[in-house]
Image: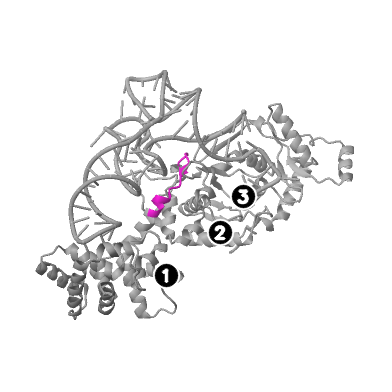
Amino acid sequence: MVRVRFAPSPTGFLHIGNARTALFNYLFARKNKGKFILRIEDTDKERSKKEYEIAIIEDLKWLGIEWDEGPDIGGTYGPYRQSERIDIYKDFAEKLLKQGFVYKCYCTKQELEKMRQEAEEKGLRPGYDGRCRNLTKEKISQYEKEGRDFVLRLKVPEEKIEINDLIRGKVVFEGEHLTDFVIMKSDGTPTFNFAVVVDDYLMKITHVIRGEDHLSNTPKHILIFKAIGAEIPQFAHMSMTLGPDRTRLSKRHGATSVRAYREQGYLPEAFFNYISLLGWGTTESKEIFTKEELINEFSIERCHKASAVFDPEKLLWMNSFYIRRTDIERIYQLSIPFLKQAGLIEEPINKEKEEYIKRAISLEQEKIKILKEVPFLIEFFFKEPEYEKENFEKIINPETKKILEEIVVILDGIDNFRKQEIEIKIRDYCKEKGVKTSIVFHPLRFAVSGRTKGPDLFGMIELLGKEKTIERIRKVIM
RNA sequence: GGCCCCAUCGUCUAAUGGUAAGGACAGAUGGUUCUCAGCCAUCAGAUACGGGUUCAAAUCCCGUUGGGGCUACCA
């Protein structure tokens, strides 16, 4: 049974790169009929925040990534929050101490710093020199008397470590580069490296799929797996997600959280689809996938080794693509918060109003890239347009005023105020007068909407209604 | 600095020894239409570099260069 996990730290909102890691784990689990586990790595008390845990869970759900075991739903291998597993790590650490795999290190921060500096000056590797490995009884009791804190360090053997990575193939680390690293901090909490391994072991994780930034940590993990007598899982190190300058995607690059995109009105399926394309592709170069198709077609072997630049432009395009082919009912539902926020609509919305809003959105649907733009695009259906002075002077002149005056008469005479009817009558007028349609259409559009760009002219007039349309034209030619 | 990973159009990718190096986004041009958008068509644009191996290399090997990661009592 395949068991994979996504293990975020609740130190911020769900990051795009992490969302991609979660997605690939999820796809791998579903594809292989395995389990996907969510584990919260909150051992860093300083930076971890409950609110971020909640936010991460919300955003994963929003993306449509569901887990089979996790802090919110439990499971047989819980708890799924590292802060609730401290005793477990302590037990494992104690056992390792008894077995002689780890030892107490009493070095102070200053001593460590000095050690590092000296090593650097001599051009040696900067790690810990293992001086506390074989402390005399006297030295230990002296340190104890001084009340010095201690950490637990693993006795790192000088051995070659090989990883058979599912994405990268064979990776070899020569033994002499690793120094005795800390597994338990002086406050009695585990380091990341230790907690991950204990958890992966206890949670029976079969495949560790994570970012390439953890590749260099993997030898440490393997050493710990060996020390606790656990079987070593399969590893798959995914390429990193980069910003446009090819450095790790971070705040400097602008919006990097899933939340930020969600709030702007991206559709979850578009986001899901887009990030699946980062560092992965099919032979057919297919790009649009439903979740089911992705589960079906996903394969870890096809994951790219090279890191991928996150391209907001393409995400934007993909979102607009999804919006165009989504039914109006859903677009309407999702647009409501944005419309409310813009002050264009208020609850409660009656049937008639709902219909009106839907028709307005429909008229502009093909132009929507993100839902956040909806209020701006349909604003003039809800409030009187503001006529920009520069455009007004350019478009409204004695000649166009005269035309508009005549259009008012025509519109007023239409009983069946439907766009087909309106279009026919206005085109007839153009023909009679022998003027180009654009001579009439442009001022009319401007008079009715206050804009030079907008939806289908006749659809717009129809929706606005005879009264409103005529009122607006009159105001302009007054 | 040491160790590890990586390298196809600007970006995401396809081609896993034999292709005119294909597609998508972005860009440019033209068409369609009442504007914008959309849609359609066309164009431009890449195998980082240098050596091998081979009849044949984007593809295999070595080196160079460039990028990224790790090197914490962060995760």
Q: Which residue is mark 1?
A: A339
Local SS, label 3: helix
Q: Which residue is mark 3?
A: A200
Alpha-carbon span between mark 3 and mark 2: 21 Å
Q: Residue at x 75, y 34 (%)?
A: A115
**Along the polypeptide, which appears first: circle 2 or circle 1?**
2
Judging from the image, mark 1 belongs to the subunit labelled: A
Q: Going from the N terminus, do you reach mark 3 or mark 2 first?
A: 2
x and y, in percent, of residue A453 in the image: 29, 62
Q: Residue at x 76, y 41 (%)?
A: A109
Q: Is residue A412 above or below residue A27?
A: below
Which three-letter amino acid code belongs to the residue tagged 3?
A: Asp
- Which residues are the magenta region? A304-316
Cα gap from disc 3 to disc 1, whole angstroms: 46 Å
Secondary structure beneath dot 1 equals helix
Residue holding disc 2: A56
- The amino acid pointed to by label 2 is Ile
Badge 3 sits on which subunit?
A
- Looking at the image, is mark 3 or mark 1 earlier in the sequence? 3
Image quarter hosting the C terminus of chain A:
bottom left
